[in-house]
Structures are given as structure tokens and as C-alpha cells.
């Protein structure tokens, strides 16, 4: 390894600053030059590494969004996705993948919600941890991002997130804490400030990361998140990205005034990371070919699609299927740094349906113009076709010009034109199925009653329509469930109504984020957290709860009382009954997706350790369990609890 003491100040300064958009300074060929790439749902790597331009990017497998990944409720798929992406990285000579993102979906309007996993830290932490393990099993590094409280995009470069300590620990830091168990090689700081301190200079929170969460890697900036290179260096940010000529000039000019110990420490970390990348690169081997990786993308979408409503019309039972709507014939994905350009040709929904044996045809009813604006197409023609068909499948949603990085959504409804088309087609159709292609909660209250079925396709990656067709035809029995609440309207969400101006955002709802609010305060929602339908029907029974040393063992059975094999995502929530400090009504502490054959039963077991019962005591400055009575609540969603049992903890 190159010794830090043999380097000049100038070399050290260059080390802590990127060489271009995607690589480190390699001491003029003396150390390994590592390559980073977005991330996190496929590779986004410009062909020319000196630019961030979206065009001229490499082609990559386009996996479903992180929303779809978590909706599978199968953390093994996060590992598989990571492993598959690790293979993509090896193929493209990428050393570090810029993901996963674990920011909590505090606001339904956050423009980047599609890139994040959940409103619940346990879900986000579990999936991120497995994803990191998967990528790193291929000797490719990850960058856990964006540390932290980057929960909205508006004014992200200068907004200060004002968060109390307990909320910070239980909601906003928890997923990072869990993900750190997988030892990501790097953590990326966020753009925003937290309680007045810029995250690229936040020594206090970096301390939590290193000293309490056991993070032993390198902290890298988000791209252009550093405003004062010296302050960032002193706080412990080791790599400023991308290369910024003005910043480097300033740093070189004040080289003699920089704290030598801080400079050495951070430059040393870059040396170590470069060495690590070099060593690990020798161990890399591709063990999944393109078809294997595409199969992972398809599998995640099949398992992540959520059947939100079904008045008995699905699966399709023969007959003529009329497909319409802009989203049926164009790839919908979120905008910004996670854009992926797939090689595979886009498969329109009618083709995918025909592939599954359905008698499907397409005609337009609504198309989109520059994203935000939709236009009614030949709605009259579509109405006539709908009337002459057995089923109408209307594909609506939000393209990347509605949900993207650096801005938030203005509202969470579909365009007026799409809503108009839904009403018109609902009147004309025998059976109307609405398929929604979007990345975050949509307010469907205007039209949901008129649809016979609603399917959440999300941003499903390159196999989206194959998976949608499989679900519609019944080849795949839907098993995805929501990992974020769909509110009835934006006005119902306390965080959306909390104080914010251009500079400050107050997290005044505290712990009551997502279901923690709706559930604790009995506020009705459109679709609750954890909700999703199946073509099977499941019954829960035989709950036993017992102690096993410090741990609590929970066991129950799920019976498939239908004639169709299916999968059920069972959820375990903990409620403190004898609470002395405020606790949300119940909180998710375990989940598992289980396959249950028709008319058979499957046993599910969870082992809960003390952390499942803890809250963060600000007085003691640590997680604490108060002796008392708790309730174990097992169910199909946060508002569909099937089994409960009380337990006393000493
Ligand atoms: C995003 C990061 C991304 C980086 C590099 C930033 O704008 O916030 O998530 O990894 O760009 O493209």
C-alpha cells in the first residue's frame, strides 16, 4: 500500500477530491483508479466518464424500482437483486455501486420516493441490508445513501430538516443503522442540513455512524453536496465528488493551513478504499449471465405487483381484452440519477397479454405530452371499443417527468385527462381494470369506486408488462403488498401540512410518519400499509408466544382456504400496552412471505429480540426497554390484524 507519510500535501488534497465525475485521483497511476456508478436499480454509467449527461449511457438491465422491491416483502429478493447488480458491475468494470437509498418516505410528494424502500425503517433497513450483502458478495462495493433526512427534494441543497432526537433515532437513522450491519464500503452524505448543520459537514452524525453503527468505510459526498471542502474534511468526509476545479484550487491554496491530522486521516481512507477495490477486483467472477439477471428483474416485478382492488374480475377468464392508455406502450420509470437504459426492447402490454394467450388489442384513449400534460386521444373511439370488449385494461400513471430527482410532486393525483378517461371507460366497459404505472402513492379517491380492479404495476423495469400480463391472466398469483400508506388525500398527511419554507422543514409530526400516524389516530386511508390482495384466501390461526431466554418466540399458522396456490406476506406488529412514554399504536417488527399450497397450511416462526420492544430514550441516550405488558399482533396488513397475544416483559 502507498504510505500516507510519503505523500505530499498536494497529493493528499487531490486524493480527498474526485478526479472526474466517477473516479478517484490515482496518484498519477500509482494507486488503483476505482469507478463508481449509479445505482441503485440498474447501472447508469455515461459512456464518457467526464460527464453526467443522461444520453449516451451504457445499456443495463432495468430492474424494478425500490418501491417494487420492498413490496415483494421478500428480503431474499433484495439479496438476489444485489448479487445480480454485482454481476452487472463486474461486466461494466464498476467497483462501487451508488446505492441503496434508505431515506424514509415521510412525504407522499417526495419526488424520489420511487428510489426509496418504505415509510417504515424496519422494512427499509431489512431490504437495504440484504441488498448490500448481495452486491458485496460479488466483491463490488456499495454506497448507502443519502445520509440522512433527505426525505424531500425541494430545496434539497439548502433546506434544514429540524428533527428531534428520538424521532431521528427511531425513524430516520434506524434504517441506516440496520444497513450498516452489512458493512457497506461507503456511505454517501445527503445534500440537506439537519438541525442547522450541513450533512457534508455533520461531524456529530458521522460520529453516530462510526461509533454507534459500526460503520468502518469511507464517507463520500453526494454529487456537489460539499460547499466548504475544508469544513467537510474536518468533519470526516473523506471523498468529495465529483471533481470540482474551484474547490481544489482553494484547498491547494490553503494547504498549509489545513489540519494535517484530518487531511491524513481522510486521505488514508481513500488509499484504503482504492487498495480494497484493487484486491477485491481480483476476486470478481461473473456467475449470472444476462438471462439470469433478467430473470431476477422479472421475478421482483412478479412478486412486487400489488392487486389493490378486485371485484371478482381478475384473473381474466377468456374473452376480448381491450388495452388502452399511454402507459401501455411506453416504459415508465422515475427521473434523475437512477435512470436506466435497457437493451431489451419495450414490450407493450397487449403483446405481453397475447404472449400469455389473451385475445388483446390496443387503441389509444389518452396519451401524454411532455410528461406532465396528458391529452385525451381518441376517447370516443376507445369508448366504442371498450363497449364491444369483455374487458378494458386502462394503463395510467406518472412518467419520469412527474416523479424525479431534485423536485417534489405538486400533487398525487393522476392527470385530469386520465381521470376523465377512467370515468368514460368505466361507463362503457363491461369490466374495467386500471393498471397504474407510477413510483409513489396516488390519490385514487376520485375514481377507485368505478374500477372493477386496480393493479399497481409501479415502475416495474424492463419486464413490467410481462409481469402485469402474468398477473392479469392468473399465471402469477399476486402477492405484493404496499410498503407505504396510500392516503385518501394529501391534506390527511400531517407531514405534508407541517411547517416548511425555503430554508427550514420542521418534522413536527415526530414519530407519527406513515401508518404510525393514520393507525394511531384512526384516520381512514385509501389503502393501508401492508395491504395487497391475492387470488387465494388465507386464514391465520394457532398463535403461540413464548419466552426463549431473552428472546420471544412467536409461532402461528397460515391456511390457504382457496383452491389456488399462493403467497402471503405475514406481518408482526408490537404494541406496548402499559406505556409510560409515547409510542405509536403499533410498529412492524418482523415479516415473512410464505408460499402456501391450496387447502394446505404453513407454519411461520419469528424470534424477536429485545430491540423489538425498545424505544430510544433521550434521557439515557440509548435504546431502552421498559418492563411492562406488550401485545404481539399478527396480520395481513397494519389494519387487518388477525391474531393477538399479550406478553409481560420484565
Ligand atoms: C444523487 C445521487 C447520485 C449522484 C451521482 C446525485 O444527484 O443524489 O443519488 O448517486 O447524483 O449520480
Image (tube, rainbow, N blue to C red):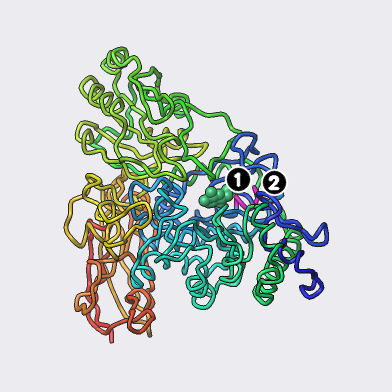
Badge 1 residue CB within 8 Å of ligand 1: no
Q: Nearer the viewer, residue 256 or 534?
A: 256
For the residue carrying disc 2, how many other residues have a C-alpha within 10 Å: few (<14), some (14-19), or many (20+)?
Answer: some
Q: Which sits earlier in the primary sequence, circle 2 or circle 1?
A: 1
Residue 232 x/y as whole percent: 57, 65
Q: How many marks are shown on the rendered structure?
A: 2
Residue 213 x/y as whole percent: 50, 74
Above-or-below relation of 15 to 532: below
Q: Which mark is residue 92?
A: 2
Q: Which mark is residue 517?
A: none
Above-or-below relation of 272 to 525: below
For the residue carrying disc 1, how many other residues have a C-alpha within 10 Å: few (<14), some (14-19), or many (20+)?
Answer: many
Badge 2 residue CB within 8 Å of ligand 1: no
Q: Quadrant of residue 413?
A: top left
Identify the image quadrant of the C terminus: bottom left
Q: Are marks 2 and 1 in contact (CB under 8 Å)?
A: yes
Whether the magenta-drawn stretch holds residue 86 is answered as yes
Q: Quadrant of residue 619?
A: bottom left
Q: Which residues are magenta?
A: 84-90
State the residue at coordinates (79%, 62%). Answer: 31
Identify the image quadrant of the N terminus: bottom right
Residue 606 x/y as whole percent: 37, 69
Lateral position of residue 484 relative to residue 640, left or right: right
Above-or-below relation of 37 to 10: above
Q: Secondary structure at mark 2?
A: loop
Q: Which mark is residue 43?
A: 1
Amino acid at each position: 500500500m502507498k504510505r500516507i507519510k510519503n505523500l505530499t500535501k498536494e497529493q493528499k488534497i487531490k486524493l480527498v477530491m474526485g478526479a472526474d465525475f466517477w473516479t478517484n485521483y490515482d496518484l498519477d497511476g500509482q494507486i488503483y483508479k476505482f469507478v463508481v456508478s449509479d445505482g441503485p436499480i440498474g447501472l447508469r454509467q455515461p459512456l464518457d466518464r467526464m460527464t453526467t449527461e443522461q444520453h449516451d449511457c451504457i445499456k443495463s438491465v432495468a430492474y424494478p424500482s425500490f418501491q417494487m422491491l420492498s413490496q415483494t416483502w421478500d428480503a431474499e429478493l433484495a439479496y438476489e437483486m444485489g448479487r445480480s447488480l454485482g454481476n452487472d458491475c463486474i461486466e461494466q468494470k464498476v467497483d462501487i455501486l451508488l446505492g441503496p437509498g434508505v431515506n424514509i418516505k415521510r412525504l407522499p410528494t417526495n419526488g424520489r420516493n420511487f428510489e426509496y424502500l418504505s415509510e417504515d425503517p424496519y422494512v427499509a433497513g431489512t431490504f437495504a441490508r440484504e441488498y448490500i450483502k448481495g452486491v458485496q458478495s460479488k466483491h463490488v462495493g456499495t454506497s448507502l445513501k443519502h445520509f440522512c433526512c433527505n426525505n424531500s427534494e425541494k430545496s434539497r441543497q439548502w433546506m434544514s430538516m429540524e428533527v428531534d432526537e428520538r424521532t431521528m433515532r427511531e425513524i430516520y437513522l434506524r434504517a441506516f443503522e440496520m444497513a450498516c450491519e452489512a458493512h457497506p464500503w461507503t456511505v454517501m452524505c445527503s445534500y440537506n442540513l439537519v438541525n442547522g448543520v450541513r450533512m457534508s459537514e455533520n461531524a456529530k452524525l458521522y460520529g453516530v455512524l462510526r461509533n454507534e453503527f459500526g460503520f468502518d468505510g469511507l464517507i463520500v459526498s453526494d454529487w456537489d453536496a460539499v460547499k466548504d471542502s475544508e469544513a467537510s474534511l474536518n468533519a470526516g468526509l473523506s471523498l468529495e465528488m465529483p471533481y470540482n476545479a474551484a474547490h481544489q484550487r482553494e484547498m491547494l491554496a490553503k494547504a498549509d493551513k489545513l489540519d494535517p491530522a484530518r487531511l491524513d486521516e481522510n486521505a488514508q481512507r481513500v488509499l484504503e478504499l482504492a487498495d480494497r477495490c484493487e484486491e477485491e477486483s481480483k476476486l470478481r467472477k461473473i456467475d449470472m449471465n444476462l438471462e439470469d439477471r433478467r430473470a431476477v428483474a422479472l421475478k421482483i416485478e412478479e412478486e412486487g405487483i400489488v392487486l389493490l382492488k378486485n371485484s371478482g374480475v381478475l384473473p381474466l377468464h377468456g374473452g376480448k381484452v381491450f388495452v388502452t392508455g399511454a402507459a401501455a406502450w411506453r416504459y415508465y420509470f422515475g427521473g434523475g440519477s437512477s435512470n436506466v437504459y435497457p437493451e431489451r426492447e419495450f414490450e407493450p402490454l397487449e403483446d405481453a397479454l397475447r404472449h400469455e394467450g389473451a385475445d388483446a388489442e390496443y387503441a389509444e384513449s389518452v396519451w401524454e405530452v411532455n410528461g406532465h400534460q396528458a391529452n385525451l386521444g381518441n376517447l370516443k373511439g376507445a369508448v366504442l371499443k371498450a363497449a364491444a370488449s369483455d374487458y378494458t385494461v386502462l394503463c395510467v400513471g406518472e412518467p419520469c417527468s412527474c416523479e424525479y430527482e431534485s423536485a417534489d410532486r405538486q400533487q398525487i393525483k393522476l392527470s385530469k385527462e386520465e381521470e376523465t378517461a377512467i370515468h368514460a371507460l368505466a361507463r362503457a366497459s363491461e369490466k374495467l381494470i386500471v393498471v397504474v404505472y407510477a413510483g409513489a402513492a396516488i390519490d385514487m379517491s376520485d375514481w377507485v369506486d368505478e374500477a372493477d380492479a386496480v393493479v399497481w404495476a409501479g415502475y416495474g423495469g424492463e419486464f413490467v408488462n410481462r409481469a402485469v400480463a402474468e398477473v392479469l391472466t392468473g399465471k402469477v398469483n399476486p402477492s405484493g403488498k404496499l410498503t407505504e400508506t396510500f392516503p385518501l388525500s394529501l391534506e390527511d398527511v400531517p407531514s405534508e401540512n407541517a411547517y416548511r419554507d425555503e430554508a427550514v422543514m420542521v418534522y413536527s409530526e415526530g414519530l407519527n410518519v406513515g401508518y404510525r400516524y393514520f393507525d394511531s389516530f384512526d384516520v381512514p386511508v385509501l389503502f393501508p400499509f401492508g395491504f395487497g390482495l391475492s387470488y387465494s384466501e388465507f386464514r391465520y390461526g394457532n398463535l403461540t408466544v413464548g419466552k426463549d431466554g431473552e428472546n420471544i418466540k412467536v409461532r402461528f399458522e397460515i391456511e390457504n382456504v382457496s383452491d389456488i396456490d399462493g403467497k402471503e406476506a405475514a406481518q408482526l406488529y408490537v404494541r406496548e400496552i402499559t406505556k409510560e412514554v409515547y409510542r405509536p399504536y403499533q410498529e412492524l417488527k418482523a415479516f415473512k412471505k410464505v408460499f402456501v399450497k391450496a387447502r394446505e397450511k404453513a407454519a411461520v416462526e419469528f424470534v424477536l429480540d429485545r430491540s423489538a420492544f425498545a424505544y430510544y430514550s433521550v434521557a439515557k441516550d440509548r435504546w431502552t426497554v421498559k418492563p411492562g405488558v406488550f401485545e404481539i399482533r399478527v396480520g395481513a396488513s397494519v389494519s387487518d390484524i388477525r391474531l393477538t397475544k399479550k406478553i409481560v416483559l420484565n
